[in-house]
Amino acid sequence: MGKVQGGMKCVKYLLFIFNFIFWLSGSLVLAVGLWLRFDPDTSSLLNEDGAPDTFFIAVYILIIAGGVMMLVGFFGCCGAMRESQCLLGMFFACLMVIFGAEVAAGVFGFLNKDKIINEVESFYLNSLQDNVNGTAIASIYHTVLQCCGGTEANPTLCPDATTETKDCVTAIEEFFNEKLFIIGYVGIGIAGVMIIGMVFSMVLCCAIRNNREVI
């Protein structure tokens, strides 16, 4: 079995290094996804009965993609070092799937940003009208976001509120804008990196096939 030589040997080791970085990137994506899912502030706001779950859909996509990226990165390293067309082909196919998932998470986060924020705002405002569980839910939002009231701060709901206390609609918008931009930028950023991996894997795979045909 012939081994690739010259410039293709350089591509081989570049692909190995890329896959190691890709594996680390998968760890980062998984960590970010888990942080967004189990962040105490976010969980306390969205884990109540009736709370909207749209935000967590994008988070789950990140978690799954991060876990698969770690697995694919490992197989990509093996495929590069063993010069296996099968492993490299599988690596390319998996990258395509993850690429789609990462872009979907990023686009979902950006396109549904206003929808997610409006759902959370509506959930909070409706809780103010609920005489059974509304007070407890509203108190969570007041404590976590350090806000009070709907579109205007309402001192009757929060006796400790000051003139600098934000209304909760503004606080919710600022809080989830920050979280959703993290999802969007992580998803689209990692997707861009994967394009490089797909190019390297196809170049090396074609070089291996051509080398075997010559031999």
Image: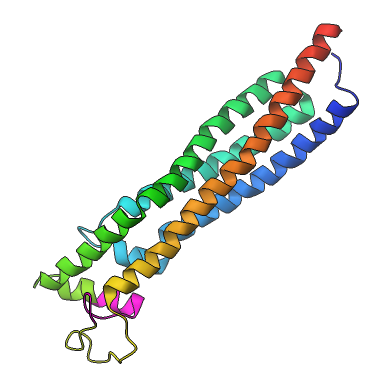
Tell me where the magenta segment starts and ends, as one range: 139-152
**Residue 47 in view here:** no
Q: Is residue 85 visible?
A: yes
Q: In terms of image quadrants, where is residue 137? A: bottom left
Looking at the image, residue 41 lies above or below residue 214: below
Residue that protrudes farthest toward the right in the picture: 6
| Residue beneath the point at 85% across and 7% down | 214
Reply above or below: 63 against 39. above
> Which residue is nearer to you in this view: 139 or 8?
8
Locate residue 206 relative to residue 39 in the image: left or right: right
Between 112 and 74, the residue placed more toward the observer is 112
Q: Position of residue 135 (x, y in %)?
A: 17, 76
**Residue at coordinates 79% horizontally, 13% vertically from top-left?**
210
Residue 150 colored magenta?
yes
Magenta-drawn stretch contains 12: no
Residue occupying image coordinates x 76% and y 41%:
17
